[in-house]
Image (cartoon, rainbow, N blue to C red):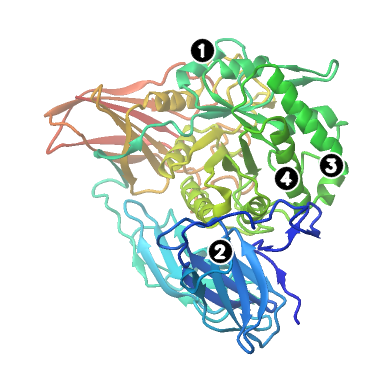
Amino acid sequence: MATVGLVLAAVVASALWWDAAGRVVSPATGAGDSSSRSSGSTRAPRGLRAQAAVGGALTGHWDAAASGTVATSYQVRVVSVADGRTVSTVETWSRSVVVDGLAVGGSYRLVVAAAGVAPPAASATATSPPVVVLADHPPDPPSQVVATALPGTNGLEVHWAPAATGVTATGAMAQLYDGPTSKGYVRCQASCTTATFRGLEYARSYSVRVVPINPAGEGPATASNAVDLHSFCLAVPSCSTVDATVVMGPARQRAQGFLDSIYPVGDMVARVRQLKPQSWRGAPTYLPATGALDWSSWDAAVATGAETTLLLSSLWHSETTTGAGARPPWADWGAYATWVTATVRAIRATGRRVSYWEIQNEPGAPTYFSPADSAAATVADYLEQFRVAYGAIKEADPAAKIIGPSLSHFADYPGEYLPNEPDLVTFLDFAARNGLRLAAVSWHEIDDDLGPNPRDYSSQPQRIEDHVAEARRLIAERVALGGPAVWVNEYGRHVNYAIPGWTLGDIAAIEAASVDRAGRSCWPEQGPGGALYDDCPAPTLDGLLAADGSTPRANYWVYATYARMTGRLVATASSDATISVLATRDDGSERVQAMVGRHVGCLPGVNLSCTRADAGTVAATPVPNPVPIPVSLEVRVPWATATAKVTIAQVSPTWGPLPNPPTVFQGPVTVNAGRLTLVLPAVADGEVYLVTIGR
């Protein structure tokens, strides 16, 4: 009989489990015994699709039953069509499975039922048509490839259906064409069915070719329809709208989080309170001379009212580094687990509140360990570190809330950036297989480029929306995860995080994606004629304040305005991917507030980090030294009035202090049919305009 193995979907044999080293053990010694679980009233899974896969394998995908108890795992039987034998019975926590090691040329069916039904009734099972196992073969082409213009912006979206028969794809490459000219591509992994392209040119006709991918190579492409992009602007190059009659949800300041650099210096704590921070991420300072922890920074952050995330990896590095890097936890798992449990207990004993625990910041980043240790580390090492630390934290505090994996980049397939960095699919599979119930799934949006294997066509902030949608899809496919929140726990790239227009772009994208929580990044920074310093350990509030811990810089006023945007978020749109708008309405004060910002390049006069050869622009289409442009802002107000009181302040990108943003307009504006129009005559790259409209 053929040896059957399980790959990709991290399927767990119903009678077997894997230990930490990857060895198969019995349910008595593993945590995965499902025999005691009851599925209650069950119905058959819907839409079962089985296909051949690379390497003598089959894949299966299905949807949850339309009614009955929601299943958290499924029993899958692989049945030989030739003689009716069940060649394998497995359990999966996902609504998908990959089974390898089958006989090439053999014909098999998949029979799927909710786990815990023994034996399952025929009415509670789904059976696939026969599938013939093939040798290595590229995937069959997708179908129903349809491209549509994104409303209110110069972008398009393409949707497709993976081949329902033949050989399955494990990813896709969506290639953008302007007529016959290739413009770039987006690559996605797993069972992705959509791709987005932003920042395109108006009055052009675009189409997309979707190329299916699996480990055997690329399959035949399927082309979409052509899409003509037309601007909704009439008299100006760029126009934006705010419809305050359409409510998108409560104003929660989702992106009002900070990293490290809150310290009791100058007026910092008072300044931070004005921003109403939602979260802070950091750790107490380790004092090597005494082995004690200095909690002054932590206590200053807590005093602002922010929830806290404690970075265990910061403390581990401080306590184990010899100057070249931290000691790898996998050098002695027992010692590492003991340290984690003892550290959590000691911190709890101080009486300080830790809202969330983070195990390892940026796993796989090449600067945490020594160069030699980093080069030798594997993805499996980082996954096991998370599993060991998770258990050690829970031993000290069973109610602890743990987040992860805090990836350096949004990566959803192995090797997208570096070969020893975990990707989101691999991490989520591992977490689901090992019963790791995360409070939040987290990653960073801080890359200066698109990676060696680009997933993104554009560097514009709106790509965050696409990443969040993909992450939520991956989480939803893995019901065993239990529905964790989605966090972008660092945003703001090195070359542009000091520029107000880019900051607003990130915040607007985070709000549009309804991210549950997001935090600003911190970086080394250097002003014109000044020395290099690091915003992370300096009292600068991640670069929002000068080094005195008191004096505001330009970006401070973006966050201060964001904190005052109370009430409810309202609908916005922009004709230009390099223009972002965020707006709210507060019915109590009868006030609409909006921020309008432009983000094209990285402005070396503002941030001297903008020095790389490819950093002159970080837009989708290079625009060297973009000139100021007029931007029309049409606002639909939510009340009946003939005039509105309007105030507009300007935040210009500058490295130096900005005690207050200047007011550039204040006065009444006529309202016609519930609408008013404001023209910002010369919006420069990196600028933000703060607009307040009162009755």
- Camera-near label (3 vs 1) is 3
Q: Can residue 326 be seen by looking at this rendering?
A: no
- Residue 270's disc is 1
Q: CA distance from mark 3 to mark 1?
A: 43 Å
- Asked whether the beta carbons under mark 1 and mark 4 sit within 8 Å of each other, the answer is no
Q: Earlier in the sequence, mark 2 or mark 1?
A: 2
**Which percent across, then down, holds residue 200?**
42, 57
Residue nearest the viewer, comparing 598 with 40: 40
Q: Earlier in the sequence, mark 1 or mark 4?
A: 1
- The residue wearing badge 2 is 117
Q: CA distance from mark 2 to mark 1?
A: 59 Å
**Which residue occupies 61% across, 34% down?**
401
Q: Is residue 654 left or right of residue 574?
A: right
Does dot 2 land on a helix, a strand or a loop? loop
Q: Is 355 drawn above or below residue 7 in the view shown?
A: above
Q: Is 190 drawn above or below residue 441 in the view shown?
A: below
Residue nearest the viewer, comparing 427 with 460: 427
- Residue 387's disc is 4
Count of numbered marks = 4
Q: Earlier in the sequence, mark 3 or mark 4?
A: 3
What amino acid type should be assigned to the residue bearing mark 3?
Answer: Trp
Does dot 3 land on a helix, a strand or a loop? helix
Does dot 1 land on a helix, a strand or a loop? helix
- Camera-near label (1 vs 4) is 4
Q: Earlier in the sequence, mark 2 or mark 4?
A: 2
Residue nearest the viewer, comparing 46 with 555: 46
**Which residue occupies 59% across, 42% down?**
442
What amino acid type should be assigned to the residue bearing mark 1?
Answer: Ala
Q: Residues within 10 Å of mark 2 (few under 14, many from 20)?
A: some
Q: Is residue 530 left or right of residue 579?
A: right
